[in-house]
Image (cartoon, rainbow, N blue to C red):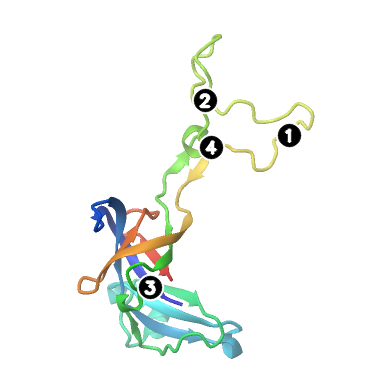
Amino acid sequence: MKFILGTKEKMTQIFDEGGLVSVATVINAGPVVVTQIKNQEKDSYSAVQVAFGKKNKKNINKPLQGHFKELGDFRHSKEFRLKEGEGDYKVGDKIDLSVFEIGDKVTVSSISKGKGFQGVVKRHGFHGGRRSHGQKHSEREPGSIGATGPQRVFKGTKMGGRMGSDRVTVKGLKIVQIDKENNQLLVKGAIAGRKGTLVEVRG
């Protein structure tokens, strides 16, 4: 299994040999440091924990400082599940973009932009009411929310509420360019999140 952590940088355009343009997302990826190995005997599952990014040591709590020890002062840490016997990682190993190749299909997970409390038109795509028959204040209202018979509102009814800040996973994205010197990965297509959002890339 291939994996790495990074941050979303920006979107750009990539031209192939035939002159066709495609949209791509630039990810500042790695290198990441292995901080813990979990196994079936001790932890009941197999995984590798990696850390990424820099953070001022005074802003890292004491338990994490003790956990990272002399490996560094990291901003992010994530676990990646492994199959039994998969991978030969040791604490302190560094993983960089050399594990990926151009043309690899990857799965990317990130947190989408938070939009706060939004109404049904923006959140669910409702059309709202028409400006006819005396209605002039119902352009963005949800309309009826319940039936006469049950005399209650059903669970799961689409209404206004908090929108965004959700974990979004996009599968089948293609790696179109790798810049090992600048630790940049270009993935064809769009991924969720703002600039600087933590991104998980799995191959």
Nearest to viewer (mark 1 / mark 2): 2
Say which mark, if any, is on residue 160: 4
Residue that numbered label 2 is attached to: 128
In the rendered image, the residue lying farthest to the left is: 181
Residue that numbered label 3 is attached to: 4
Mark 2 and mark 3 in contact (Cβ < 8 Å)?
A: no
The Cα–Cα distance between marks 4 and 3, rounded to whole angstroms, is: 36 Å
Q: Residue at x 64, y 26 (%)?
A: 144
Report the amino acid beneath label 3: Ile
SS for dot 2: loop
In the rendered image, the residue lying farthest to the top is: 133
The Cα–Cα distance between marks 1 and 2, rounded to whole angstroms, is: 22 Å
Nearest to viewer (mark 4 / mark 3): 3
Labels 1 and 2: the sequence-earlier one: 2
Labels 4 and 3: the sequence-earlier one: 3
The Cα–Cα distance between marks 4 and 1, rounded to whole angstroms, is: 18 Å
Nearest to viewer (mark 2 / mark 4): 2
Report the amino acid beneath label 4: Gly
In the rendered image, the residue lying farthest to the right is: 149
Q: Residues within 10 Å of mark 4 (few under 14, many from 20)?
A: some
Of 5 and 63, the residue lying toward us: 5
The Cα–Cα distance between marks 2 and 4, rounded to whole angstroms, is: 13 Å
Q: Residue at x 38, y 62 (%)?
A: 174
Labels 4 and 1: the sequence-earlier one: 1
